[in-house]
Image: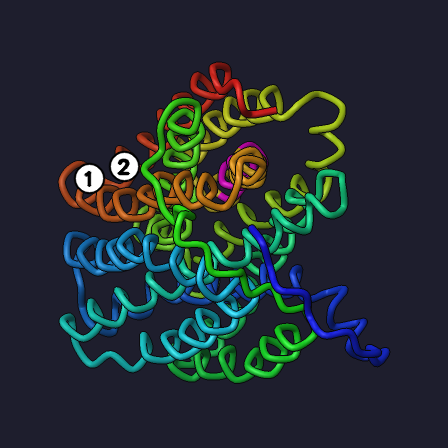
Amino acid sequence: MTTKPSPSRPASPSRLIWRKFAIPLFFLLLGIVFATWAARIPAIRDHLQLDAATLALVLLCGGIGAVGSFPLAAWITGHYGARHSTLYAGLALLVSLPLLGLAPGLASLMLICTLYGAASSCFDVAINALGAQAERDAGRPIMSMLHGWFCVGTFSGALIASAVAGLGIAPVWHFLLVAALFLYPLYAAYVALPDDRPEHDPQRKLFAVPHGHLVVLGVIAFCGAIVEGSVADWSGIYMKDHIGASDGSTPLAYAAFAGMMLIMRMVGDSLKARYDARRVVWVGTLVASAGIALAVVAPGMAVAILGFAIAGTGVAAVFPFVFSAAGRHGSTALAAVATLGYSGSLIGPPVFGFLAHGWGLQAALALLGVLCLAMAGSSRRALWLQ
């Protein structure tokens, strides 16, 4: 992608600091917003008196918004550049979060969840495009570290949500506080980054359906999105309804999942350099299937939390390594794989809900273990996953 050079001007010390931490901050922001919403789903479910099937419809709307917006995300990123796209989508994301807590009924919650899904996917594509470019500029693997910052956000967001829920604070006030705290950092990080607005090129293809080796990467990302999204959206429900945990304890399962993902992503780049990405993903997803199995048969809260922690350890490498592999082949390839990958966000949590409604939470959770085995098989055939 050809970009216009940004005007040369001396950068202040504060601007240099913001530039250094800008991209990690974006991943952190996405993680905190993601965990904040996911951890308070049980409270919103109870407030609106939704059953598992109805909640699945709400989550389906979020997936529709996410997947349906990928052509828009690719167009915005290609037209305005990843930096500007990050600001626009980030503002929409921070606005949609409090609206989720303000929804007075099912119809409005479904509509707002669609907006939230669209904003989060556009933001995700933009920051991964920034990350892929930063990795190319650095000449070494850094994508796992960047996704590690996402896990810092999900882990801290889940722990904060546990404390807030334990204090009996309504989700809307929780969501408003998170949105207000990140408004200025989002803008300051955007201002600090150099301009990357692309030159107009009528021949450039901004979006494409995955094909060839990209399909295998997309399948792995698809299954990974189902597992991550379902654990985020339903682990709290599983802990409350099946294990019998309190409102303050229900987010701990996702906190354990996200915390172990954080630890593994911080060492993921060194593991990739030593063993290659394909082997790390293959072994990791086998470990994740064992963790899901442990959570399924768990007799109590401690064992269930341990199972989710093991699962987080195993799936941690999936998204950074798949996105890094796709990003090496350009932004169009990245958007194409992201389309397949985040289709899992459309299908996974709602299907989990329908299965839970018909067959029970344990059966739905067991399906995630099967998907981890499918990722293990696919990763052995992913020639571009290096």
Q: Is residue 274 left or right of residue 370?
A: right
Q: Residue at x 72, y 29 (%)?
A: 271
Q: Is residue 187 magenta?
A: no
* Camera-nearest residue between 122 and 331: 331
Using the image, determine if residue 356 lies above or below residue 58: above
Task: Residue 326 in the image: state x and y as whole percent.
Answer: 51, 36
Asked whether the residues under the numbered discs 1 and 2 touch, taking CB atoms below 8 Å apart as contact, a structural biologist would say yes
Secondary structure mostly seen in magenta is helix
* Mark 1 nearby-residue class (10 Å; few <14, some 14–19, many ≥20): many
Residue range corresponding to the magenta coloring = 305-314
Snapshot quadrant of residue 18: bottom right
Q: Is residue 88 left or right of residue 242?
A: right
* Camera-nearest residue between 269 and 374: 269
Task: Residue 335 in the image: state x and y as whole percent.
Answer: 42, 46
- The three-letter code of the residue at mark 2 reads Ala
Q: Is residue 312 magenta?
A: yes
Task: Residue 323 in the image: state x and y as whole percent.
Answer: 53, 40
Q: Residue at x 39, y 67 (%)?
A: 40
Dot 1 or dot 2, earlier in sequence: 1
Q: Is residue 135 left or right of residue 305?
A: right
**Residue 364: mark in rendering:** 2
Query: What is the quadrant of the C terminus in the image?
Result: top right
State the SS at label 2: helix
- The three-letter code of the residue at mark 1 reads Leu
- In the picture of the structure, the residue carrying the numbered disc 1 is 355
